[in-house]
Amino acid sequence: MVKKMDTPLITAEKDPKWVLLGKTLDIITSRRVKQEMAKQGIAPVNLAGAMFKIVLIAMFFSVDITYVVSELQKRAELRRFAKLGKIPEAEEIYRFLGRFSEKQFVGLVLGVLSSICVKRGRNRVLIVDSTDVSLDLNWFKKKIKKADLEEKEFKWGYSSSKGYYIGYKLTLVIEYPSLRPVAFLLHQGSPGDAKIYEEILEELKRRRIARDGDTIIFDKGYYGYKNYVLGISRFKVIPVIFPRKNFKLEKLMGMLSYPLSIFNRSNPEKEKKLYNCLVKSLKAKLENWKKYRPIRGVIEDIFKLAKDAFSLKKLHRYTKRSVKKFVCLHVLLVGIVVSLGINTKEELQKIAEW
């Protein structure tokens, strides 16, 4: 069997893909990003910038870091384009990235995106969805049983679009209409969406991403009467979870009553007013939930962009620590792209098909 050869990385500075890459690399070495690196303890910042450039080029063209290093070493025009001098070996890059924790990577990514993307306003809308993150394990050649994974950090999962896989489940939260990624969670295997619903909202409120009164859009996988109630009563958000066929709005309205905790607050009347507003808004939005389908559909284009254009479809990483770091960089790359004004369905699909 002939092994597929990677395409040579010959710069074409007028080509839209190379133009986008050039803008992305400029952002990575900008003063603002260097400040975020220093803030998160990722140093020295100039070396970190060079390392991240090489990794992002690899992701941009869906090739190995080793291949990018070899192309940079033999192509002066590529080095000039990337504004890189001495090119490190691939092992140096992996060692450097291994020095830092997932927490540092998450802080860096969210800090950078917060600084370069459109700021959030009032009455904000968040979109939540999940996708599989497969690991590049040849389990057809050697059958891998569930018991074989008991000591591993990755698990068997199931996706309706691709069937069984080994890896993780990525939950992504983006703002609308800016499409800025604001949070993500990584789970082993493929836990049900409804089961991790509460964990998602806890994370959004803990990090003050979701504010009181925000609208959060979920697909039918997160459906459950208790999840509507939980969203309003505990987290004070408007959970627009797309309903299933047997959904009865009257039943839900009958379940929504003031939680006892309201009467222990310093200003219960204010709390009751907020609660009533949330219930009224949820009712109106569930009566017209179908109009939110196109809005929620945008996150599917974000996932397609990350997978088809930036190699998130199958990762060559085999520890949760490593997977989470590279997922961070995929989220960063997607966030940079939308910050550059590429935020319509047509534009996102076009790049995904490059």
Image (cartoon, rainbow, N blue to C red):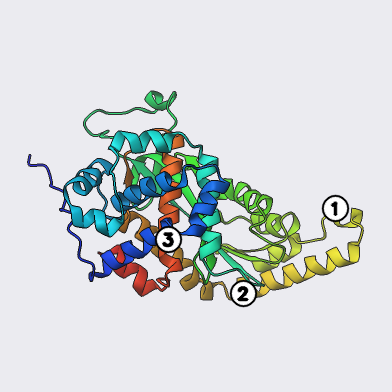
Tell me the residue that label 2 is attached to: 287
Dot 3 lies on which element? helix
Q: Which badge, 3 or 1, comes first in the chain's sequence?
A: 3
The quarter of the picture where the C terminus appears is bottom left
Q: Nearer the viewer, mark 3 or mark 1?
A: 3
Q: Residue at x 49, y 55 (%)?
A: 33
CA distance for labels 3 and 2: 43 Å
> What mark, if any, has residue 27 been given in the picture?
3
Residue 312 or 156: which is nearer the viewer? 312
Is residue 106 placed above or below 346 in the rendered structure?
above
Residue position for label 1? 261
How far is mark 2 from mark 1, CA to CA?
28 Å
Q: Position of residue 15 (x, y in %)?
A: 23, 69
Residue 62 image label: none
Where disc 1 sits, the SS reads helix
Q: Is residue 233 visible?
A: yes
Within-10-Å neighbours for mark 3: few <14, some 14–19, many 20+: some
Which mark sits nearer the N-terminus, 2 or 1?
Answer: 1
Front residue of 147/130: it is 130
Where disc 2 sits, the SS reads helix
Farthest residue, direction front: 85
Q: Is residue 192 visible?
A: no
Q: Residue type at mark 3: give it.
A: Ile
